[in-house]
Image: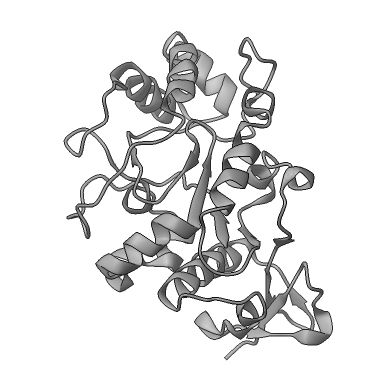
Amino acid sequence: MLIVLSPAKSLDYETRLATRKSSEPRLLDRAAELVKVMAEKTPAEITKLMGVSESLALLNFERFQDWETPFTPANARAAILAFSGDVYLGLDAPATFSERDYTHAQKTIRILSGLYGVLRPLDLMQPYRLEMGTRLTTDAGRDLYTFWGDTITDLLEADLAGSPGPDVVVNLASNEYFGAVRPERLSRPVVSPAFLDAKAGGDYKIVAFFAKRARGAMAGWLVRNRVSSRRAINDFDGLGYRYAAERSTPERPVFLRDND
């Protein structure tokens, strides 16, 4: 099993580390190519490229100027502890993972990244912001999807051979990030859980904020419980969600949550 997550815009490089385990990103040379392109851009160009405020553009300009290798625990942080957005608040690794959980997560979780391509949870990363949907022109083409090409998919495929649990890819990433994966090139089926919340009138809909938390919560649950069958994914009941068989397909299990 591979569990695929999106990264987060929010980062945390201040909180005390919950584990000292770390590893080196496997596509660091490719990331360095992108950093070289971004380091040549002015803050004004970054503002236009990313659609961010002047202050955020300046922050990321400085990050690309400061980016350097080799990565060490002194200048970088494990990805699962560096990202702090809604998905990672739902995952809640610092509070709920044991050392053995981190080891298992390293085998089963993959984080897609515009800059780093594919990160394992314990891969060190320096702070950045470069979303997969950014239309950054490189020698490979006009956007990051073109830059990464088959590289992300091929690495996921290679990782599937050594991952424990059922032979399946659990897609808990956003459409923007999973768009960098070419499912037809994977030798295992892709399961994309959906999380819907009750709305007025009795129907259910996806609420982005809640769905992000739920994706992280499911990822953490899969790791902590060492889920070993595809069917067992449907047993997830975190954050008040329940499996809805009548709305589900094998490729898209649906989980509903009612208002209290």
Give x and y (percent) for residue 95: 28, 70
List x then y, in percent, for residue 20: 19, 52
Residue at the location (49% across, 30% down)?
115
Q: Nearer the viewer, residue 47 or 91?
A: 91
Residue 211 lies, with reference to residue 234, above or below; the image says: above
- The structure residue drawn at horizontal position 74% and vertical position 85%, both measured from the top left corner, is 244
Q: Quadrant of the C terminus?
A: bottom right
Residue 14 image offset from top left, x and y in percent: 21, 48
Quick check: 243 above or below 177? below
Does any portion of residue 202 appear in the rendered image? no
Looking at the image, the residue that sits furthest to the front is 161
Residue 209 is left or right of residue 53, and the answer is right
Up the image or down, 166 lies above or below 127; here it is below
Whether residue 243 appears in this view of the structure is: yes
Residue 166's image quarter?
bottom right
The residue located at (57%, 68%) in the rendering is 210
Front residue of 229 and 255: 229
Q: How many marks?
A: 0
**Residue 126: quarter of image:** top left
45 versus 123 height, above or below? above
When asked about the image quadrant of residue 254, the answer is bottom right
In this image, 23 relative to 258: left or right? Answer: left
Q: How is the image coloured?
A: one colour
